[in-house]
Image (spheres, coloured by chain):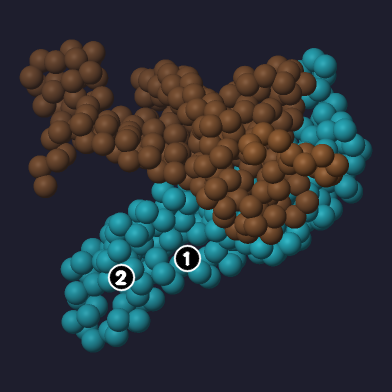
Chain colours: A cyan, B brown
Amino acid sequence: MMLASLFIEALRFIPDNAHLLLDKAVETAKLAFTALGIAVLIALPIGLWLGHKHRGLTFALGVSSVGRALPTIALIGLFIAWLGVGFWNVTAALVVLGIPPILTNAYFAVDGVDRDVVEAARGMGLTERQIVTGVELPLGLPLLLAGIRTAAVFVVATATIAGIAGVQAGGLGQIMANPVVYGQPGVLAAAFVVAAMALLTNFALGLAQQAASRRMAPRA
Amino acid sequence: MIGFHEAGGPVIPNFGRGTDCLRNNHWFCPSWVRENWGDTLQPALIQHIELTLVVVAIGFAIAFLLALAGFRWRFLDPPLGAATDVLYTLPSIALFTVLVSITGLEVITIAIPLVAYTLFILYRNIVTGLRSVPADVLESARGMGLTRRQTFTKVELPLATPAIMAGLRIATVSTISIATIGAFFINYGLGTPIFDALGVADIFRTKLLAAGGLVILLALVADVLLSLLQRALTPWSRTR
């Protein structure tokens, strides 16, 4: 099949099967954002606390490099062996993949906050908790959001692997892993939808990040 | 009497029943790994290393040329950056599936998407590294009478090396990890034993863990080697 005609057929597939794609996109989004939410809940407090204490640099760096090295498919397999096939084993694997960028960025966001500012806050009598939530968190917000952004794009794009792991309700990945059923155009169309979702996520979080850094920029 | 059996007994061929550990599908059976290292794990590991080296080398060459263009002609940077961004968001499974129909069931079908993914990481890091050279430094280079080319090779490139090497580390480690997914389509590298293990009823845990562990180990070793290379290339940053 010629590449150009494949491309055009894929673009035709989208309106013709809008309902299917939408359903599957919602499944993928559910998987991805559940995982992202859990990853934020786990990684953010750890990253913030370690960054606040300026401790555990090797841990923060180690987590990020081990996280990148984890083969997704082996991870999903491991969770299937452990939790059985279903929504939660893929979610668990995606959580593990989402944690490293969030944790590492949270660490560096807080670690990089000007120490004089933190000292000043301490001098004003703020408690450690108040320093983290009131000073370090807002100042480090742009970098922290950058980490969540990286994790989000990664998790959305990777959620499709649920398809080859044979998960029911595996979202767009199911279409991609079944060219026999949906045809090459269907696979490519599903890929376009995933790419659009990832780009949209990237764009939305990019806006949030810009808003955060604008708010934190010193006023002229 | 060696070599003679009593006649009349049942002749049951012994195909090897596997150890207790294997029959009960325990999480990890070291004996299986020892016995299957030579014919399963080692060849897959070597294929994986070869694939990674080729992919990262090609990706680096392309990304470097693109980054030079994006750095030299600023107007090219946004479109090039956006193009490499889009490549990165395309899910690997879809790229592999579509490419199978174009390039066939060859290793190149997994290599092309992997190269595409390295571009995103490397392009960004190389351009950012080159851009981050302080204006004062460039000013003094010009003041010392360096030509544009000399400024690039003697000032900008060395100062960008840490950022470039950081990109190379991320690209290499991600390539090692994503290459496993390619084995869903073409039996190549450490993904093959992983998918074999996933393909049998209730999952061959030892094989899955052994192959998955090798992927992680390979990635960590590559990361350490590249960080040593980075230190060797930038002796001035070692003063502390």
Which residue is disc 2 drawn over? A52
Q: Is residue A14 left or right of residue B168?
A: right
Mark nearer the viewer, 2 or 1: 1
Task: Report the chain holding disc 2.
Answer: A
- For disc 2, the neighbor class at 10 Å (few under 14, some 14 to 19, many from 20) is many
Among the 4 quarters of the image, the one containing residue B148: top left
Can residue B181 be seen in the rendering of this structure? no
Residue at far left of view:
B144
Question: Which residue is drawn at the image coordinates 44% and 44% (left, top)?
Answer: B217
Among the 4 quarters of the image, the one containing residue B153: top left
Residue A175 spot, x, y in % from top left: 81, 41
Pick the quarter of the image with the N terminus of chain B.
Answer: top right
Residue B82 spot, x, y in % from top left: 54, 33
Q: Is residue B231 left or right of residue B112?
A: left
Question: Which residue is drawn at the image coordinates 77% and 32% (left, top)?
Answer: A188
Q: Are both tags, 2 and 1, on one chain? A: yes
Q: Is residue A106 above or below residue A133?
A: above
Type of amino acid at the residue the image marks with label 1: Ala
The number of discs equals 2
Q: Secondary structure at mark 2?
A: helix
- For disc 1, the neighbor class at 10 Å (few under 14, some 14 to 19, many from 20) is many
Mark 2 to mark 1 CA distance (whole Å): 14 Å
Q: Secondary structure at mark 1?
A: helix
Residue B104 spot, x, y in % from top left: 73, 18
Q: Is residue B110 left or right of residue B158?
A: right
Residue A126 spot, x, y in % from top left: 28, 84
Which residue is disc 1 drawn over? A43
Question: Which residue is drawn at the image coordinates 71% and 31% (left, top)?
Answer: B185
